Amino acid sequence: MTGLAGVPGLAPFGDAAAAWMRRVHDDITTTLVDLDGGSVPLREDAWDRPGGGGGVARVLVEGDVFEKAGVNWSCVHGAMPASHAQRIGARVPASAELRFTATGVSLVWHPRSPRVPTVHLNVRFFEIGLEDGTVLDQWFGGGTDLTPFHPHPDDPRHFHRALRDLCAAHHPQFYPRFKLWCDEYFVNVHRNNERRGAGGIFFDNLRVGDPSGLDFAALRAFTDAVGHALPAAYGPIVARRRDEPYDDADRRRQLLRRGRYVEFNLVHDRGTVFGLQTNARIESVLMSLPPLARWEYDPVVAPGSADAELQAMLEPRDWADE
C-alpha cells in the first residue's frame, strides 16, 4: 500500500458490526441462562470508555452450574498510534493519524464442579482508518477453547468434533489451521510451554484476501457461527458432567489449574493487554478471572494420578479424529 489511500473494496462497517455483536451478546446470554438453569439472575453493567465507546457486562455469580460466568459486549473507538496498530497486526503506514473501531463479545464461564470444564469464547471485528472515514484495514478474529479439570477425554473429543464440523461448513482448511493456532497460542511459556487447556480454535487478522479466498460476507458468517458455537460444542458436556460427584482432591486440582489460567490471562493474553492499553473498564477486562484459584509452591504430580492424566491430556492431539 502506498500513501494514505483507502484499500479498494473496504467499506466502513464499524457501526453495523457493533449492532451485530450486540445480537451475538444477547444470544450467548440466553445460552448461559439456559445452561445454568435460570434460577440465578445475571447482573448487568453498562459502561462508557473515556475517549470513545463503551460496553455491557453481564455476570452470573454463584449460579447453579457456574461459580462465576461473564459475557461482555464492547465497542470502543478513538485515536490509535500507528505503532500500536501495527503491533496488533494492522496494515497501515507508519506516518498515519489513525482512528479505530473495535467491537466484540467475550466470555469465560467457570463452573462450580471440577468435573465440568471452563470454556472461553471470543469474537471480534477491527476497523482502522483515517479521520475522514477512509478505511485502511479491517479484520475478524475470535475462537473458543476448553479447559478441563478432570481427565475425561470424551469432553475435548466432543468439543473438537463440534468445532471441526462448524469450520468445515465454511472452509475445509479452517479447522486444522485454527486448531494449530490455538494449540500454539494458549501456552504458558513461562511454565515450560505448559498448555492452558485442551485447545479449540483461534484466529485473528482474518481478512478479505486471506488464503481462504472468502469474501467479507463469508468471513462474517464464519465469525458469527463461532459466536454461536457453544450450544452444540459445550452444552452436551455440561449436561453429562454437572451432576457427577467430586471430592476435595478434584476441587484442589481445579483450583490449581485455575491458577495457571490466571497466569496466562495476565501475562500472555492479547485481549487483556488490548483492554488495558485502550483504557477499557477494568472489571470487564478482568472478568475472565475465576472467583477462587490456588497456587502451591512446586506442587508434585504423582505418576498415575488424575493430576498426571490431566496434564498428559492437555498436550495437543488430533481430538476430532480419535
Image (spheres, rainbow, N blue to C red):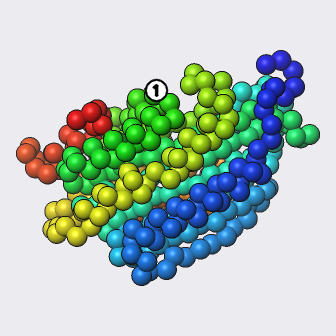
Identified at 49% across, 43% down, the residue is 143
Identified at 34% across, 47% down, the residue is 159
For residue 290, say whether it is visible: yes
The amino acid beneath tag 1 is Gln
- Quick check: 319 left or right of 146? left
Could you tell me residue 133's position as x and y percent? 88, 40
What is the quadrant of the C terminus in the image?
Answer: top left
Q: Check disc 1 and report the residue beneath it.
A: 173
| Image position of 97 with respect to 291: above or below | above
Which residue is at the front of the view, 51 or 299? 51
For residue 296, say whether it is visible: no
Count the marks: how many?
Answer: 1
Could you tell me residue 243's position as x and y percent? 22, 70
Give residue 138's quadrant in the image.
Answer: top right
What is the quadrant of the N terminus in the image?
Answer: top right
| Image position of 202 with respect to 253: above or below | above
Which residue is at the front of the view, 65 or 171? 171
Identified at 63% across, 41% down, the residue is 220
Identified at 51% across, 76% down, the residue is 42
Could you tell me residue 310's position as x and y percent? 20, 47
| Image position of 306 with respect to 114: above or below | above
Q: Residue furthest front?
A: 169
Under circle 1, the secondary element is: loop
Which residue is at the front of the view, 200 or 192? 200
- Quick check: 245 left or right of 202? left
Q: Residue furthest top?
A: 2
Which residue is at the front of the view, 22 or 217? 217
- Quick check: 15 left or right of 319? right
